[in-house]
Image (tube, rainbow, N blue to C red):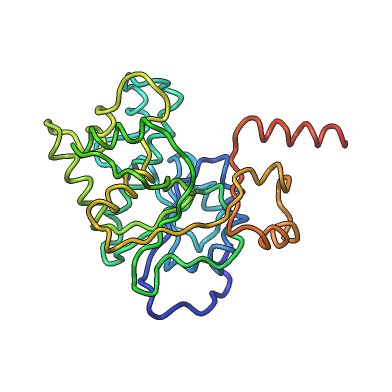
Amino acid sequence: MDAPPAADCKLDAPEFDLFSACHPRDLFTLRLALPRIYSLIQPRQIWVACRGRWTLFSRLILGRSVSILNEDKMIPDMTLAALRQLPVEPFPKGAGWYYQQLIKYSFSFHQPKVPYYLIWDADTIPLRPLSFFSSEGKSLLAESDELHLPYRESYQRLFLEESPSGLKSFIAQHMMMKKAIVQEMLTMIDANFSGNESWAWKLMRSLPSKGLNLFSEYETYGWYSSLHYPDQISRINRRWLRDGISELGYPPTPAKLARLSASFDYTSFEANRASWTSLFSRKKATA
């Protein structure tokens, strides 16, 4: 799939790439999203990380305009298979959820001449033009109403400081990241824990052995930036729909997406079991 012609870009906006960690189940949603990403988000380049055995299929599905990365080559001393051996609940099955967060941080070392990158969840489709920098050049970080205490506890362990209070969540399917800030975070994690392993292993070994969803790449970057670089970020509210499957069915038609754009900036099609089971039950009932 070749990129459609991009609309005029804002001349004063910093250049950025878009990075997505894509599970095989989200490949077709990402393919649907690509034309809208090009026209409504306008990244310099799109990079997609996928599992090694899926790279050729991913190239076929997503087309030549997307750069495919093998996720197991993104962190020098860690692979998903190795991470699965860590005694953390509910490994080995849940290791992929953590690994995709780690490779989002590791992308900060790619393409050093481009200072920013937008992490974009592969199951998410933009509906309206989206800006990621204020008129003053600050990164716009979207807020949400999520609240999960273990994320704050992990932040404190990693950085030896309290996460900022009084802020909404930053878990909103995307985040504009400054590479220098991400790298500073990873250097601090490396320094705060002894040993010769990489920051990725140190981060994972800092987590308790029991408990679900113990770390968030979105919250961690948002809180760190809010504390250490408040003059470089600005928070923004965006309207988005999490369960696009229930609202639109799957795959969503262009007409349905157009109607949804009257109310929302973007929608996700999270491949959770309940949504997909409900979808296929409806299809079977109408067959």
Within the image, what quadrant is residue 149 found in?
top left
Is 6 on the left-hand or right-hand side of 278? left
Is 213 on the left-hand or right-hand side of 231? right
Q: Nearer the viewer, residue 117 or 139?
A: 139
Is 85 on the left-hand or right-hand side of 41? left
Could you tell me which residue is drawn at 20 percent across and 51 percent down?
184
In the orientation shown, which residue stands out farthest toward the front?
Answer: 166
Q: Quadrant of the C terminus?
A: top right
Could you tell me which residue is drawn at 54 percent across and 74 percent down?
6
In the orientation shown, which residue stands out farthest toward the right?
Answer: 287
Q: Quadrant of the N terminus?
A: bottom right
Could you tell me which residue is drawn at 37 percent across and 79 percent down?
12
Q: Nearer the viewer, residue 200 or 79?
A: 200
Q: Locate residue 71, reporting x and y percent.
A: 38, 43
Within the image, what quadrant is residue 77 found in?
top left
Could you tell me which residue is drawn at 35 percent across and 71 percent down?
14
